[in-house]
Amino acid sequence: MIELKQVHKNYDNGHVALEDISLVIGRNEFVYLIGPSGAGKSTLLKLIFRSELPTSGEIIIDRFLLSRIANRQVPYLRRSIGMIFQDYKLLPRRTVYENVAFALSVMHFPRKKIRRQVCHVLELVGLEQKMDRMPHQLSGGEQQKICIARAIVNNPPILLCDEPTGNLDPDTSWEIVQLLTKINARQTTVVMATHDTEIVDGIPKRVVAMEKGRIMRDQQLGGYIE
């Protein structure tokens, strides 16, 4: 599903963001990426999403070798990857429904199918009664649920989450992770970057610990993977 082979990422200013990353994430896994700020977690997610390219190494997402796909193929790749951000990135002048429906509209889905899928995911995240609200009328946790609904409305097999609980209180954070666990149970691969060790301890999954751009530990409940 996701494979990185000896991936390095260096920036023009000399900063080494990732160094010799080799990692395989199987279909339907739930993986936490943990580590302090600057460890390389967000960079790793950006490379998988192909919003950035590695300096060297290979990244394979399902059938796509990311270093060899043309720019015109990137939108097709991203249809199979949902992305959730810490800062929501919602459209402030569109309703909850419109925010979630936007991506499907861009892909020219039929209106009836858009309505059916948007209503389904809003029910899944518990916002079906608030689809006509504007983002500023909702709490931070509810706004993050809009982002989750938007990311999964096209049923992507992969969901990337970049510190999705970073701006939320502990109770709301726990609720968001439980929701992501539910989505994972629907046979979606979930990769979640976080520095919140309480969440990791609360719902044990595979943990990939990063520090200074390197993988320091790869551990599953019951023992180490490597």
Image: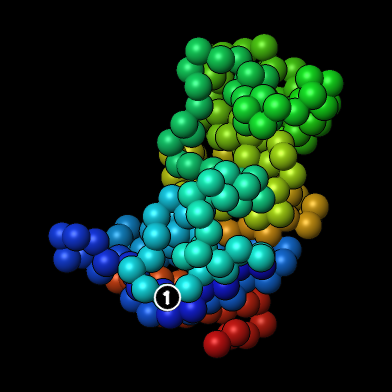
In which quarter of the view is residue 125 placed?
Answer: top right
Crowd tier of the residue under label 1, counting other residues whose Cα lies within 10 Å: few below 14, some 14–19, many 20 or above: some
Q: Can you give x and y, in whole percent of width and height, for residue 138 in the image?
A: 56, 20
Q: Can you give x and y, in whole percent of width and height, for residue 11 in the image?
A: 24, 61
Is residue 140 shown left or right of residue 107?
A: left
Q: State the quadrant of the N terminus.
A: bottom right
Identify the colour scheme used.
rainbow
In which quarter of the view is residue 141 placed?
Answer: top right
Local secondary structure at mark 1: strand
Residue 53 to residue 75: above or below: below
In which quarter of the view is residue 110 placed?
Answer: top right
Q: Can you give x and y, in whole percent of width and height, for residue 29 in the image?
A: 69, 66
Q: Which one is in front, 34 or 52?
A: 52
Residue 126 to residue 85: above or below: above
Q: How many marks?
A: 1
| Mark 1, residue position | 57
Residue at screen point 71% across, 36% down = 153
Is residue 199 shown left or right of residue 62?
A: left
Q: Is residue 170 visible?
A: no
Q: Can you give x and y, in whole percent of width and height, for residue 212 in the image?
A: 30, 71
Is residue 124 shown left or right of residue 48?
A: right
Residue at screen point 63% across, 19% down = 98
Residue at screen point 55% across, 87% down = 226
Is residue 111 shown left or right of residue 50?
A: right
Residue at screen point 51% across, 54% down = 70
Q: Is residue 182 visible?
A: yes
- What's the amino acid at mark 1? Gly
